[in-house]
Amino acid sequence: LKVPVMREGKVIGGVGTSIFLNDLSNILAEELKLSDDMVFYAVTAENEVALHSNAELILQENTDLPKNVVFKTSPLTGWRFALGFKD
């Protein structure tokens, strides 16, 4: 994950970090305490699964993700964060 550092509308640098997506997904799944019929996930701007309540689905294509969800798109990353019921 990286973001530009801006000054007067110009990029003057960048800040980045490494995130272990499997670990983050497992932590979120534990903390959210969702019922068995619910799912959370995040999809990148390139349509790859970045986070999922089932960590085995990370970096897979999003063809089988539930479609009946509420979601919010991050203005920073372009990722879509979703929460819904399994199909």
Image (spheres, grey):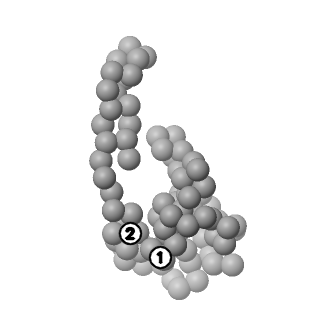
For label 1, the crowd category at 10 Å Cα-Cα, with few meaning under 14, some 14 to 19 and many 20 or more, is few
Q: Residues within 10 Å of mark 2 (few under 14, many from 20)?
A: some
Q: Residue at x 35, y 18 (%)?
A: 7
Disc 2 to disc 1, C-alpha distance:
8 Å
User: Can the viewer see residue 48 in this picture?
Assistant: yes
Image-based side of 25 in relation to 15, left or right: right
Compared to residue 78, the image places residue 8 above or below, namely above
Q: Earlier in the sequence, mark 2 or mark 1?
A: 2
Residue reaching furthest to the front: 60
| Label drawn at residue 56 | 1
User: For this view, does 80 lie left or right of residue 21?
Assistant: right
Question: Is residue 28 at least partly visible in the picture?
Answer: no
Q: Amino acid at mark 1?
A: Glu
Circle number at residue 68:
none
Residue at image location 49% in from the left, 68% down from the top: 58
Circles 2, 1 touching at the beta carbon (< 8 Å): no
Q: Is residue 9 above or below residue 51?
A: above
Q: Residue at x 61, y 64 (%)?
A: 61
Q: Residue at x 60, y 55 (%)?
A: 47
Amino acid under disc 2:
Asn
**Front residue of 23 and 85:** 23
Q: Position of residue 10 (x, y in %)?
A: 41, 17
Q: Position of residue 37 (x, y in %)?
A: 58, 83
| SS label for mark 2 | helix
Task: Point out the image quarter for the C terminus.
Answer: bottom right
Please state the horizontal and vertical placement of residue 17, each as a whole percent of the image. Answer: 30, 47
Number of marks present in the image shown: 2
Q: Position of residue 11 (x, y in %)?
A: 39, 22
Secondary element at tag 1: helix
- Residue topped by disc 2: 22
Residue toward you, 33 or 20: 20
Question: Between 36 and 52, which is closer to the camera in this rendering?
Answer: 52
